[in-house]
Amino acid sequence: MVFQQTQPYQNAFTGKIAIIASYAIVLTYFTGIMIQVNYFDDEDPSVGGCLLGFALALLAFAVRMSWADVDAQVSNGRVIDSLYVELNNKQNQHKKDYAVAWVAYEKDAEDTGFDIKIMLTAFAELKQIAEARGDDMLQPESASVLMGLVKLMEEYQEPALKVLREWTISCGGRFQAGPLKKADRIVIKARADYGGNLRKVLDGVRASAIFHSLKDLHRAVRMLCEEGCLIIVI
């Protein structure tokens, strides 16, 4: 029905106004039919009075609910603003930490005679390899629903971490396992990046490979470029 998709009957937080409006419409039509078939006494004003009273009560209730919705929107807006501020602060801190770390990496590269341009070239090559694979890689059909995807992640978490751990150690890095991506984050990413297609969410099992020099990082990137590497970059 049109009123269920149009403001102000429904907003982003609730559909209560739509429900109230539907009650008023049903009551009005029902009473009209009863009057038309002479179900009520034509001389009895109580029918109209009851209908008017009920409509006014619904209106008052609708106004109350709309104010409750406004309060909820304001409250949610404050929470969202607070989260954005927190996120912005963390991003700024991460930028500072990255800048400090990069200076240390650059100094180590200079001290050891490592040419950073070689590493950047390796990254460019890895990017080309990933782009050549395309974006058609999907999870199995069972991952079409959230519970299926979560179950798949839990089932393959240990085998995936084992492969990642062995690869990281083989190229001189330090392995650090991470938690599984949470269900709400999976849904958010699927909707934001893949049009709601859960099968395209491929980063449910997470881990970090930490390298203490750009030379070691370059070695790892080169290994990722090798044909037959168990780690596939997409």
Image: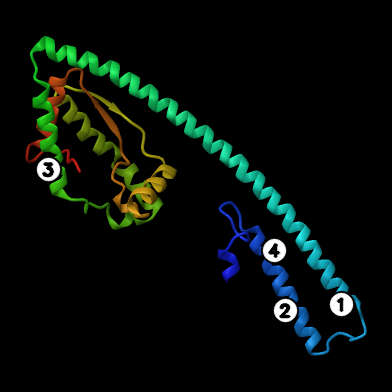
Q: Position of residue 5 (x, y in %)?
A: 55, 64
Q: Position of residue 211 (x, y in %)?
A: 20, 21
Compare marks 2 and 4 and give the one earlier in the sequence. Answer: 4
Q: Position of residue 109 (x, y in %)?
A: 14, 15
For label 4, the SS is helix
For label 1, the SS is helix
> What residue does disc 1 label?
47
Residue 4 drawn above or below residue 14: below
Which image quarter: residue 7?
A: bottom right
Q: Amino acid at mark 2?
A: Tyr
Compare marks 3 and 2 and give the one earlier in the sequence. Answer: 2
Q: Amino acid at mark 1?
A: Val
For label 2, the SS is helix
Residue at (42, 44) in percent of width and height: 183
Compare marks 4 and 3 and give the one earlier in the sequence. Answer: 4
The answer to whether marks 2 and 1 mark residues whose Cβ atoms lie closer than 8 Å is no
Compare marks 2 and 1 and give the one earlier in the sequence. Answer: 2
The total number of labels drawn is 4
Which image quarter: residue 155?
A: top left
Q: Amino acid at mark 4?
A: Ile
Relative horizontal placement of residue 157, taking residue 122 as reference (left or right): right
Which image quarter: residue 172?
A: top left
> What residue does disc 3 label?
129
- Gap between marks 2 and 4 measured at Cα: 15 Å
> What residue does disc 4 label?
20
Relative horizontal placement of residue 45, taking residue 99 as reference (left or right): right
- Gap between marks 4 and 3 measured at Cα: 57 Å
Q: Which numbered dot is residue 29?
A: 2
Residue at (58, 55) in percent of width and height: 11
